[in-house]
Amino acid sequence: MNGRSRQRGRAQNAFAVMRALISLGRASRSELAAQLGLDRSTMTHITSALLAARLIEAVAEAPAGSRGGRRAELLSVERSRYSILSAEVRSRSVRWLLTDLQGEPLADGALGPSMPSAGGAVRRSWMEGVLADLRDIVRSHPDGRRVLGVGLALPGLFDRSRSRLVESFELGLSDLDIASVWNCDDPPLRAANDATCYAWREIAACRTELSRGETTAADGVYVYTKLHTDGERFLPTGMGVGVIVVAEGRILRGHRGAAGELRGYGYTVRDADQLGVDLEQIRLRDGQQAAVNAAATELIRNLVVISSLLDPPRIVVAGDLGALGLEMRRLAADLVPPGQVEIAFREPELLAVAHGAAQMVVETLFSPESPALPLNELAGSDNRGTEFSYGYARVNTLQ
């Protein structure tokens, strides 16, 4: 193994340790070595570098064993120096969230104004303003913390291979290169469909089980639904449904790296009827409920097909349609064959998608396969943290 390969291997091991501590909360060096299959000397070297970079910290000592002897030191992810910024973009609001590296919320807020009811150029300018506001939050170093990465959840079809928002009915935007609008690689930005970010949030909720080897703990089909409104008048203009499949703790994606949008129910002159729903009704307040009911019925029917093809352990419907509760459960009982799959419905949660976007960023930063965070820039050039730098390029990690 040449020197570059050894350095890359060290970086991969370092980030594997970070991921393990994020999942476990706290652990001793011997526990980490056993879980990751590393020898004790290697683990000592890795944790020394991570301590020097102040990515981890010693938090306590483990209880003494039955044979006595020196008590093991417990390590944890450092929680006061670094943070992750994320945001969910919707036409009627943009909510941002600041978390520590383990996903604990630190602060949140809203960016305004809402998207204007205007042409594409004005909407693009609005989107540029949103990203500029996020850069301002990064520069302010909230609570003195350095923001290591930014996550962005967007409604619509997203091509991760080209870092582009292909089309968003809700935002009225198409072919938008988010990377060029961000135009910044410190911190890196990662963006994805909002349904994908919701699925990341569900994976994060099962982090402990996944770290114990329960690889199917988060598996299922996750459906994220939204009623669209125009930006200024908040009149209903359509509906969005994103569907994400999680298998063995990973999100399944297509050949462009995309996954998520089952259907966008956006009204256009050439497309006035989708999935049996008269979209003109959605534009009228009096007909909205009938249109929502029709869309909910058609959604359940589509989920029956998905269930038959994939045989998932669970289907979770969240967001605006998830709030219909008893009505959706009745539809599911009528349309889903007995014993095929359980469909759960969850009320909308204000920061669930933003939380998932933050988790997505953490996974990117500390990915053993493709680490995106240069340790030497955190540790400085005067300590052992530099040994993990193998010269990978400073690139925007937006996917």
Image (spheres, rainbow, N blue to C red):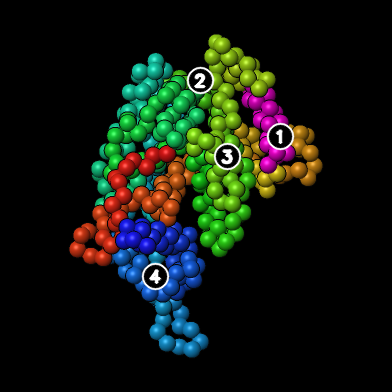
**Element assignment for label 3:** strand
Q: Residues within 10 Å of mark 1 (few under 14, many from 20)?
A: few
**Residue labelled with disc 4:** 43
**Residue labelled with disc 1:** 305
The part of the chain drawn in magenta is 289-310
Residue located 51% across and 20% down the image = 235
Please tell me which of labels 2 and 1 falls first in the chain: 2
Q: Residues within 10 Å of mark 3 (few under 14, many from 20)?
A: many
**Marks 3 and 2, how far apart at CA:** 28 Å
Residue located 51% across and 39% down the image = 196
Please tell me which of labels 1 and 4 falls first in the chain: 4
**Element assignment for label 4:** helix
Please tell me which of labels 3 and 4 falls first in the chain: 4
Please tell me which of labels 4 and 2 falls first in the chain: 4
**Residue labelled with disc 3:** 244
Indicate the position of residue 251 as horizontal and vertical percent values. Answer: 54, 44
Residue 287 appears in the picture as rendered: no
Indicate the position of residue 326 as horizontal and vertical percent values. Answer: 69, 37
Main SS of the magenta segment?
Answer: helix
Residue located 68% across and 36% down the image = 306
Residue 135 to residue 19: above or below: above
Marks 3 and 2 close (CB-CB < 8 Å): no
Q: Nearer the viewer, residue 244 or 327?
A: 244
**Element assignment for label 1:** helix
Instruction: Kindly identify which numbered label has been placed on residue 235.
Output: 2
